[in-house]
Amino acid sequence: MSPIGLGLINVFFILIALVAVAALLTWIERRLLGFWQDRLGPNRAGPFGSLQVVADMIKILFKQDWVPPFADRLVFVVAPAVVMVAVLLAFAVIPVSPVIGVASGFNIGLLFFLAMSSLSVYSVVLGGWASNSKYSLLGGMRAAAQMLSYEVFMGLALIGVVVIAGSFSLSDIVAAQRGLWFIGPQFIGFLVFFIAGIAETRRLPFDLPEGENELGAGFHTEYSGMKFGMFFVGEYAGIVLISAMITTLYLGGWQGPVLPPAIWFLIKTFFFVGVFILLRAALPRPRYDQLMAYGWKVMLPLALLNLVGTGAGVLAYQYSS
Amino acid sequence: MLNALRTLWLVFLHLFRRRETIRYPEVKPYLPPRYRGRIILSRDPDGAERCVSCYLCAVACPVDCIALQKTEEEGRWYPAFFRINFSRCIFCGYCEEACPTYAIQLTPDFEMCEYERTNLIYEKEDLLISGTGKYPGYSFYRVAGLAIPGKDKGEAEREEPPVDLHGLLP
């Protein structure tokens, strides 16, 4: 088969799989949260409730698609699409296995990921702005400030990986982890990236942009129907994205014994998806100033120290050999 | 940080706990005998209606969901109609407390959903049960001093025959 045909199949497969997984995560999350709260969660529709997704989809698609009269119509409609587009595009650079992956050899793959994950902020900010209501605006503002702060050391944490692997291409980074997963030498970087990733996906405990108890629903207060669904699925796709990135950058990507590469990738990714959900089940939301102080006073110095240490280590290694 | 990790671990352990959920339609929850559910009208041991249409339940009802009309038949009072609008009823049980004859009672049954609101208006035929409910053996007319056919003044349980105040005998 021609490379273009193979590439198209890859694109199609990854797109469908990602959207399906993101939708399915709504059910997985509710079930897991239920289990961790001694409940059962949705278990009625289909085997173990797995058709709950279908039911939710049918419901949300047939809901009235309403735009508030006071909203900025065009931006209001575009905003939810931006988050989906940004997250789906970011997935292009992730190597699911040596053969599955849209542009996993892209020589600035990591930068592309950072750019796309930053773009998704626009969706939240624009959604909050276009809704023209105070809660949405507050949520959007919080999202902007939070993501700006957490983006900084997210990038800095990734530089450690780049320094060791010597490449921005994700498939090279995976290949560089053949002997030792980067979670070992880059453990601090891993922690920093993980925490920044939680903030990036606006998940608990960093879900201040939509803090229900003070902002209604934050930036998507005015959204309903499938536009809200887009934000929702976009959030879950973001979780999958961050989990996949952690897997790729720190856990050796698709590498692993016996099982096929794609299966290893899925296992590692879903482990982190589970951790994301566990975090939601367990941790309370910090105050906004605590969030900012934590970001700038703890995580940023930590990321810088990690970067300096990694650089020194790599230099020492190069001189000694 | 360590606290957060400990919290995560403890929450994770809940995966292996017993579920609190009762899978309702398949598993029925236990309802205590005094549960305040669907309202019924009971009968006395002889099979006659206990309700004497005193209106106390309708008065006690905080949401005015009980409607009834008194009628009389050979000295006994009956409700001509007795209607409870269950779409209004809040199952507070005040009617049961107000009832002097144990006629109106709340039962441990709550499965009374309807697709149409009007189907929630229960008439006397729907409310009357064949038994005595929570108070077996109690019959209002057997203990009350009221004269009805077959039971004259002074013939009720624990009742002395009436004294003739104008008589001179000791």
Image: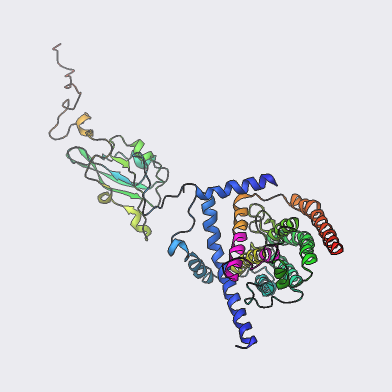
Instruction: Report the magenta stretch's main SS.
Output: helix
Q: Nearer the viewer, residue A24 or A250?
A: A250
Residue A319 higher or lower than A1, as above or below:
above
Residue B103, horizontal then vertical, whole percent:
28, 39
User: The C terminus of chain B is located in which quarter?
Assistant: top left
Q: Is residue A253 magenta?
A: yes
- Picture quadrant where residue A84 is located: bottom right
Colouring scheme applied when the structure was drawn:
rainbow
Residue A65 seen in render: no
Q: At 64% across and 58% down in the image, what residue appears?
A: A217
Q: Is residue B106 magenta?
A: no
Residue A21 seen in render: yes
Q: At 17% across and 19% down in the image, what residue appears?
A: B163
Residue B118, horizontal then vertical, whole percent:
35, 58
Q: Nearer the viewer, residue B26 or A318?
A: A318
Q: Nearer the viewer, residue A188 or A230?
A: A188
In this image, B43 relative to A243: left or right? left
Give the residue at the far right of this rendering: A319
The region drawn magenta spans A245-273
Residue A23, horizontal then vertical, whole percent:
56, 67
